[in-house]
Amino acid sequence: MVRYLALGVLVAGLAAIVWTAVRGDGGSDDPAASPATADDRDAAATTAAAPETTVAAAGDPETAVGDATDFVDDALEAADPVAEAPEAAAPEPTVATTTVPPEPIGVLGTADTLTNLDGWLNTDATSLEEIRATNRLTVVQFWTFGCRNCKYTLDALGQLYTDFRDRGVEIVGVHSPEFSYEADVDNIIEAAADLGVVWPIALDTDKRNFHRWQPGNIGYWPRVYVIDGDNQIRFDRTGDGRATYEKLYETVEQLLTQA
């Protein structure tokens, strides 16, 4: 509607300008009028002198049309609701974040003790209970230095020991030899140094603890447990799989966080 009204104003304005221009150029409308005298011409010149510039500007059709067009464009732009309406901002997407707590680590049973040992290496302790009493968690691994699968686990145990030793985690390697040369203490000491085993070693030469902790006809090298401060078993796995020792690391870390 605003556009149509503005167009009508423009047409009316143009018509008025054209009519004014025609009137100014044509002179008198009366063919019978007598020629003007010199005095009349002087008076008329004196009267018309002041508005001369205005008449000339108003009498220029092209200038008038341009001014009128600019006026209409300004009016249309000011009245255009689309031009004035602010662009609606797109709503920012919201992402719901939830933190899923880890599954609780259950209790698998009560840990046994270590008895009838032939001694200890890398520690002044004389019993598993003494070690447990001064630590928050104890990792117990049954192993023997000639076992290839056992050797595969030592890097993971070493990393765990480095990361958590100062947080109250101790490892006990229960050395239960499979062959006679593995029962020699000097060989055990040398192999431990070569393999980087720096945590306590319990000498289970006759494998009595090996079989008591793993009842039945089959025992495993390696087998690893995690015992908490209440002497409860919280982790028990066999083999040397990478996933097993990654899970061991995660279990120790989680238990330390929850304790």
Image: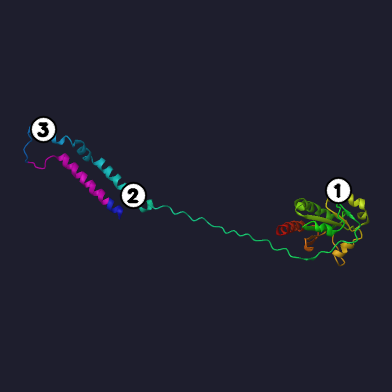
Q: Is residue 231 above or below residue 72?
A: below
Report the magenta residues as a range. 7-31
CA separation in Å, label 3 and label 1: 130 Å
Q: Which mark is residue 78?
A: 2
Identified by mark 3, the residue type is Asp
Q: Which mark is residue 206?
A: none
Q: Main secondary structure of the magenta part?
A: helix
Residue plotted at (86% across, 48% down): 193
Counting other residues with Cα less than 10 Å from the Cα at mark 2, is it few (<14), some (14-19), or many (20 or more)? few
Residue 9 shown in magenta: yes
Residue 19 showing in the rendered view: yes
Q: Which mark is residue 42?
A: 3
112, 27: nearer the viewer: 112
Q: Quadrant of residue 224?
A: bottom right
Badge 1 marks a residue whose secondary structure is helix
Is there a contact, CB below 8 Å, between mark 3 and mark 2? Answer: no
CA separation in Å, label 1 and label 2: 89 Å
**Residue 233 at x, y percent in the picture:** 78, 63
8, 46: nearer the viewer: 46
Badge 3 marks a residue whose secondary structure is helix
